[in-house]
Image (cartoon, rainbow, N blue to C red):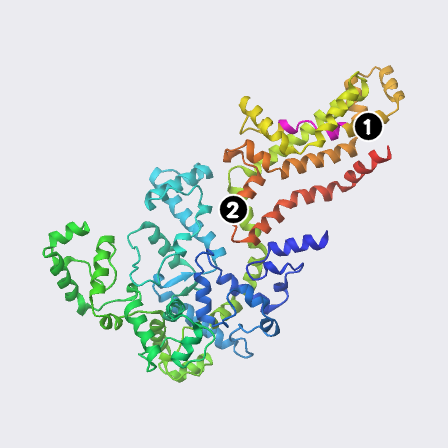
Amino acid sequence: MVIPFMIMLTGAISNEWDFDRHSPVPLYVFDRSERYMKYVSEKYLSVNREFPRDWRLFSAAYQPPAAWTSFRAIREDPAYREQPPLMFGAQEGREEQLERLRTDYEEWLGTLDPMMTLPMFARFTIPDYQNFIRAKYERQYLEATGQDRAGIDARTLEKGALSAMAEKWQEARFTGFFYLGMMTEASLPYHLREWLPPLDERRFQDYMQFLHQLPPDRVVPITARHLWVRYLESIAGNLTAFNEATGLDVDAYNKVDLPVTEPANPRLRELWREFIYEKWPLWLIELPETMRDDWLGYLRGRFETIDAYDRFIEADYASWDDVHWDGASPINSLERNVWRDFLLSRDPEVLAAHRVSAERSWWEFLRARYATPEALNAAYGWDIAGFDDVRVPIAEADYAQFLANERPFLRSSLTFNFHRVFGYMAIQGRAVFNTFILVLLSIAATLTVNPLAAYALSRFRLRATHQILIFLLATMAFPAEVSMIPNFLLLRELSLLNTFAALVLPGLASGFSIFLLKGFFDSLPGELFEAATIDGASELTIFGRIVLPMTTPIMAYMALLSFMAAYGGFMWAFLVCQNEKMWTLMVWMYQYQQTAAQFPYMIMAAFALASIPTLLMFMFCQNIILRGIIVPQMK
C-alpha cells in the first residue's frame, strides 16, 4: 500500500516532465538537473495541446536534436540520461556573468511592446490571468452598482463581475472565472502574414494589460528566428533534400539561423526572400513618417472623398489630415482592413526595410549599453564579432532565471497543484458543504435505522423474521446500478430530485448492516434483557443504554462504510442532482477531470486531496474499526 500511495503523491506534485515516470520519490527535490528540466518544461508547457506554440518557442531557442519532439522524448533519450545537455551557462565561474545577463535581459523585456511577447508557465499564468480579469471586473461591477465589497457576498460579486465582463467582451459563455483558460489568446495567429492584432476588441485589450504587468521571467519574446524556423518547418519539406539544396548539414530546421541579409546560397536565398517578402507578418512592420503621404494617397485613390472613407470605416474624420497614422495597424477594425490592403499593395522590398523584431530591439539595447562587442563579450563571457551576430539569449536567460528563482519554484512545485485543486473545489457551487451535510445525514441514518431494524428482528421474534432476512440478504445480490432507474423514477414522482432526501433515502437501510447487527444481538444472553426488564427499564431504554453501547465497534465499522459510500459516491449523486448547487465533491471531481484533462498531474492532485478525509478516518478510527471486524467473527 505504501509504494502506490507514494507514487500517487509524487504524481500529484509532478508536471509534464516527470508525471509519466511513476516514481515513488520526486527526483527533482534532490537533483538540480531534474529540477531545471522541470522548470523548463513548466515554462514551455503549451496552454492547449492543439496549439503546441510553446514547444516551437523552445525548439527555436534551444535547438534540440530532431528526435526530441517533446519533453517526454527528451527524458527517455539515453543521451539525456548520460549528460543533461540543456543547462546552458552552467559552467563553473559564470554565475556573475549570468546574473548580469539576466538583469539586462529582463530590463530589455520591460521595454518591449507586450504585443511582441508571449506568456509562459501556462499552469501558473492561467490562474493569474483569471485573478487579474476577476479583480478588474469586480471593481467595475462595484463601481457601477455603488456597492461596497464588504457588504456583498462572494457569489453575488462573482456573478456581477461575470456579467460586466460578458457585456464588455460580448461573450456570455463563462459561468465562472475558473473556465477562463486563455484558449483564445493561445491560438492567436501571430505568425500569419495578413493577421493584424484586434486592438479594438475588449478581450484583447485586457489580455495586453495582463501581459504588460507580468514579471519578465514569465514571458518570452516573439523572435524573428522563431518565425523563421516555423516557416521552414511548414514549407521546406524533406530535411535531406533541404540539406542537399542548401549545402547545409543540419538534423533539424531549428539549427538553421535566419540570415541578417540576403544569403548567397541559391536555395537558401529563395527561402529567405519568400519569408521576408511574402510571409513576414504585417503587424511586425512599422512605417516611417515619410510614408504617411503614400498612405493618404492610397486612401484618396481608393475612396476619393473623406466622407466616402468615413462611411466605409464608420468613422468621423473631418479631413484627410485627421486620418489615423502612427506607422502601424489602426485600432478601428474596418480601418485595419484598409491598412492591410495598403501594405499588401506596397513593394515587398520597401516593407521589408521597415521590419521590427525582437532581435533588432535587443541589438539596439546592447549597443546603447555596451557600445562595443568587446565590452559585451567581457560582460557576458561571449565571443561574438558584432552585435548583429547576437541571438536573443533565451536559453541562457532561462538558466539564469532558474538560478534566481530556484527555491520559490521548488516550493510552488510542491504545493501549486494542491492549492489550485483546492481552490477549484472550494469555489465551485457548494461542493464541500453539500458533501459534509450528505456524510452527516448518511451516517446518522445508518446508525439509527439499521440498529432499530436489527433489534426489532432479534428481540421480538416475528413470524416472518426468516423471510425478512432472506429478502434483506437478497438485496446484496444485485449491483446498485440495477435499482438506480426505479429509484430515480420514484424520487421524481415524489418531487425529491435535487434534494438531500434524494441522496440519502435510497441508502437509508442496509441489508448487510441489519444482518450483521441482528447476529450480534442474537448472541447476547437472554438474562441480560430479563434483568433489565425486572429493573423496570423500557424497551427503548434497554436498546439505547444497554445494547447499543455494546455494539460500538460494529457501529464504527458501519459508520465507516456509510462514510465511504456517501463521500465517494458519484453516479447516484450525479443522477438525482442535476442542479450544480447540489453537486457533491465527487461530482465536481468528475467535472474537474474534464476541465483539466490536459493536466493529468492536476487530476492526480485532486485524487490525493479527495483521499485525505478517508485516510484520516481510517487512521483515527482504525482500532475501533478492527474491533468491528474481529468481534462479529468471534461472536
The kind of residue tagged 1 is Gly
The residue at the point 20 percent across, 65 percent down is: 345
Residue 571 x %, y %: 59, 37
243 in the magenta segment: no
Chief SS of the magenta region: helix
Which residue is depicted at the point 39% across and 55% down? 185
Report the disc number at residue 519. Answer: 1
Dot 2 corresponds to which residue? 594
Locate residue 53: give its quadrant: bottom left
Q: Where are the magenta residues, as a range?
A: 505-514
Element under label 1?
helix
Quadrant containing the C terminus is top right
479, 326: nearer the viewer: 479
Q: Is residue 631 above or below residue 370?
A: above
Q: Is residue 137 visible?
A: yes
Crowd rating for badge 2 (residues with CA inside 10 Å; few <14, some 14–19, many 20+)? few
Residue 256 appears anywhere in the view? no
Q: Are marks 1 and 2 in contact (CB under 8 Å)?
A: no
Q: Nearer the viewer, residue 590 or 623?
A: 590
Residue shown at 32% from the left, 50% from the top? 202
